[in-house]
């Protein structure tokens, strides 16, 4: 399986046109209200979570957080104060069973100018539909093959699915570049001197509801890295169960067979289309 048909390429192109889906109409918007009274939507809440949230906020209020008739309001405060209030909110939701896979690791929420407004447990970002960031690296060879990792069966999200050679969330104190190099070592054993060769190639905005969970809103920072033909990835953090090296055609077939995580499917499809033009 070494050739990519016109229909396969068309299917990948069509898929890439649907990376950012709107929140379902019954999801409750979360509004960040600025000091000037102007608000912006920064998240969306699954309707299954609303009654619990109304009850807990009604009996035990949290500073800077309030429940409106048709939205959850977050009043802008200093980053530390806002982070503390949102952490209280997240802990309540965790106790209610609405935030699985708590990681004790923070993500940051940034506005369109790159300013950091708050930091919060990463597992809470999907529950509230807050926009997070991640890096994904396409590891390829001169033979036009791709190295892919298979996620550990113990991962809280997408266990056993195919992923890029390295991928992961950008923590609150990282840049995309730093995150990409870290993930390459932790997930695939790529030494720093080789990881320095990553090429930034673009960004994909992913938005989609997660059944039974929340709303996934994430900016994927994409890098390409050419690997030596004799390089074999080795996982160091226990999050990858193994690796496969496959042709672009086989990767496309596995994407269309739904063997990838959603994010990695889009990133890999983008790589295939760029390499075949």
Image (tube, grey):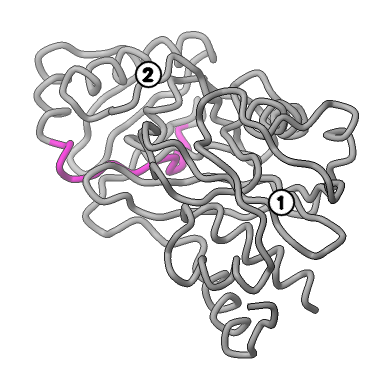
Mark 2: secondary structure: helix
The Cα–Cα distance between marks 2 and 1, rounded to whole angstroms, is 34 Å
Q: How many marks?
A: 2
Circle nearer the viewer, 2 or 1: 1
On the image, which quarter does residue 160 sit in? top left
Question: In the image, residue 218 lies at what x, y percent?
Answer: 52, 44
**Nearer-the-camera pick, 237 or 156:** 237
Q: Could you tell me which residue is drawn at 76 percent across and 47 percent down? A: 223
Question: In the image, residue 157 lies at what x, y percent?
Answer: 38, 39
Question: In the image, residue 144 lies at what x, y percent?
Answer: 79, 65
Q: Residue furthest front?
A: 230
On the image, which quarter does residue 269 sit in? bottom right
Mark 1: secondary structure: strand
Question: In the image, residue 233 lies at what x, y percent?
Answer: 70, 38
Q: Could you tell me which residue is drawn at 61 percent across and 51 percent down? A: 244
Assess whether mark 1 and mark 2 are in contact (beta carbons under 8 angstroms): no
Q: Is residue 80 above or below residue 227?
A: above
63 sits left or right of 41 in the view: left
11 sits left or right of 71 in the view: right
Q: Is-magenta flag for residue 46?
A: yes
Crowding at label 1, few (<14), some or many (≥20) Cα neighbours within 10 Å? many
Q: Which quarter shows the C terminus? A: bottom right
Which residue corresponds to mark 2? Answer: 86
36 sits left or right of 222 in the view: left
221 sits left or right of 252 in the view: right
**Nearer-the-camera pick, 245 or 112:** 245
Q: Is residue 21 above or below residue 153?
A: below
Q: Could you tell me which residue is drawn at 66 percent across and 32 percent down? A: 234
Q: Earlier in the sequence, mark 2 or mark 1?
A: 2
Which of the labelled discs sits on residue 138, or is there none? 1
Point out the stretch of residues depicted in magenta: 37-50
**Nearer-the-camera pick, 8 or 38:** 8
């Amino acid at each position: 399986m070494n050739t990519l048909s016109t229909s396969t390429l068309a299917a990948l192109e069509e898929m890439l046109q649907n990376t950012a889906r709107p929140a379902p109409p019954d999801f409750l918007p979360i509004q960040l209200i600025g000091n000037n009274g102007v608000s912006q939507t920064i998240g969306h809440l699954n309707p299954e979570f609303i009654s619990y949230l109304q009850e807990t906020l009604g009996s035990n209020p949290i500073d800077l957080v309030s429940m409106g008739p048709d939205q959850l309001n977050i009043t802008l405060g200093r980053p530390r104060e806002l982070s503390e209030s949102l952490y209280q909110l997240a802990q309540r939701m965790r106790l209610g069973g609405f935030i699985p896979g708590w990681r004790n690791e923070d993500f940051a929420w940034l506005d369109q100018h790159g300013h950091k407004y708050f930091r919060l447990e990463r597992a809470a970002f999907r529950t509230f539909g807050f926009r997070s960031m991640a890096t994904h690296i396409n590891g390829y060879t001169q033979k036009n093959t791709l190295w892919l990792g298979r996620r550990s069966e113990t991962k809280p999200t997408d266990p056993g699915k195919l992923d890029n050679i390295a991928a992961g969330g950008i923590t609150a104190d990282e840049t995309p570049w730093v995150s990409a190099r870290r993930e390459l070592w932790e997930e695939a054993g790529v030494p720093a001197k080789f990881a320095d060769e990553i090429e930034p190639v673009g960004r994909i905005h992913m938005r989609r509801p997660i059944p039974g969970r929340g709303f996934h809103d994430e900016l994927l920072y994409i890098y390409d890295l050419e690997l030596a033909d004799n390089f074999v990835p080795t996982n160091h953090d226990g999050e990858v169960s193994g690796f496969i090296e496959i042709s672009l055609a086989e990767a496309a077939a596995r994407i269309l067979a739904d063997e990838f995580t959603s994010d990695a499917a889009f990133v890999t499809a983008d790589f295939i289309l760029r390499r075949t033009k």
